[in-house]
Image: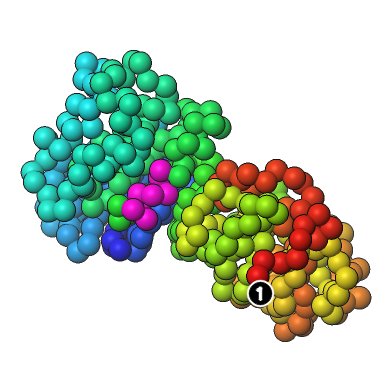
Amino acid sequence: MSHLIAKCAIAYPDFRLNAALDLSIDGVTAVFGPSGSGKSTLLRLIAGLDRRAGNIVCMDGETWQDDAAGIFAPPHQRQLGFVFQEARLFPHLSVRANIGYGVKRKPAVEGRFDFDQVVDAFDLRSLLDRRPQRLSGGERQRVAIARAVMTHPRLLLMDEPLSSLDLDRKDEILPLIERLGHDFGIPVLYVSHAIDEVLRLASQLVLLSGGAVLAAGPIEDVTNRLDLHPYTGRIDAGAVLRATVSKHDSARGLTEFAFTGGVFRGPTIDAPVGQIVNLRIRSRDVALSLERPEKTSILNILPGRVTQVEDSGGPHAHVLLDVGSPLWARVMKVSARELGLVPGKPVYAMIKAVAVDRRSMGRTTAMDASLTKDTLAPPLE
C-alpha cells in the first residue's frame, strides 16, 4: 500500500484548483468528476508535469514538491508511470521496442517485472513486431499500459485511458487494469468521467467538482451518500456493495458474491473466484418487508435495519438500510408511514439479481433480464 499526500492550490483566469488529498492507495483509486473539474490538472501536478508554486506532493514519506522548502523533483525522478488518453507510442519503433524503451531510460529497479511476463499478461506476443500504425486503438493502449508497467512504477497515473475507445475495446482493457493491483502490486490513480468505469475498477473514490474535492474515501461510502448522487452522474440513487466472487454456477447463469452482510446472487460474470468486485444496486430495485417472505421469486432477501429516512421532495422517500453494508431503498412515502420506517426498525430488503448494475461488475455471460427463482434452480450448495 502506498501513501500519497497532495495539496494543490492554483488559479487560472477562469478556473481555480484547490484540492487536498491524503490517500492510502491499494489497487485503483479513481478521481472522478465532470469535464473541467480539474482531474487531469491534478494528475499533472502530482507527476511534476505542471510546476506551480505553492503545491506539496509527498509519496511514501518522500517529498517530491514543497516550494516553501525549495524542493522539486522533476518527473523522471519520481518513478511514476503515466498513461494518457492517447497511447503516445513511438511510431518508428516496434511494439517490442516501445515496451522496452521505458526500461532503458530508467536506472535498474529491484524486482522489475520480466518482459515476457508483461507481454503475456497483456496478450501482446503476436503484436511484438508490429508498428503502432498497424494496431487498433485498444491494442495501442494495451502497449502503452505494458510499457508503463515495465518501468515498475511506485504509482501509475492514468488519465482517461479508455475515453477514445468503443465499448468492446473498453471491455477488453478493463480487466487488464484490474490486474495491475492484483497481479503486479502497482497502485493506480485513475482519472475518469465515466461512472461505470469507476464502479468497475475502484476501491476508493475522489470526487471533484469545480476544482474542489467534494469527498474522498472507500467507494461504497462516497457513492452511498445521497447528497452526492447529482455529482456521480446517476439519475437513480443506489448503493455499492464491495464483494468477493465466491462461487459460479454457469448452468443457472449465477455468480455468488460474499460481502459483509452475507451472500448476494447475481448474473454470471467473467471473474475468478476470490476477485473483489463492486456491485451497484439501484434504490428503485429494492423492496422492503417487515417479515421475511416465504414464497417469492426474489433471489436476494437480506435482513437489516433502517438507519435513515430521507424525504426526496416527491411522492417517494429514500430509506438507508444497514444490511452489513449500506443499502438504499426507494419507497412511497405512504408505504414508509404504514410500515413505520424509522431509524432502528428491523426490515427485510428484497433485491432481484437483475438489479445489479452489470457494467459495474464487468462483462456478464448471463443476459436474461428476469433472473428469479421461477427460472432458476435452488440456491447454490
Give the quadrant of residue 123: top left
Nearest the eye: 152 or 2? 152
- Relative to residue 5, is residue 269 depicted above or below? above
Q: Which residue is mark 1?
A: 323
- Asked if the magenta segment contains residue 181, the reply would be yes
Residue 288 x %, y %: 81, 70
Q: Main secondary structure of the magenta part?
A: helix
Residue at position x 79%, y 50% in the image: 370
Examine the rendered structure and indicate whether residue 74 appears above or below residue 344.
Answer: above
Say whether residue 140 is magenta: no
Q: Secondary structure at mark 1?
A: loop
Front-most of residues 312 and 323: 323
In x, y percent, where is residue 176? Answer: 41, 43
Q: Is residue 187 left or right of residue 246?
A: left
- Quadrant holding the N terminus: bottom left
**Residue, x 66% and y 56% (percent of image)?**
254
As drawn, 324 above or below 367: below
Q: Position of residue 342 (x, y in %)?
A: 78, 79
Mark 1 Cα shell of 10 Å, populated few (<14), some (14-19), many (≥20): some
The stretch of residues the image draws in magenta is 176-183
Number of labels in the image equals 1
**In the picture, which quadrant includes the C terminus?**
bottom right
At a point 91% along the width and 68% down the height, the residue shown is 334
Q: Of residues 11 and 188, which is closer to you in this image? A: 188
**Residue at the outermost left position:** 107
Q: Amino acid at mark 1?
A: Val
Residue found at x 36% / y 27%: 140
Residue 73, position as x, y percentages in the image? 14, 47
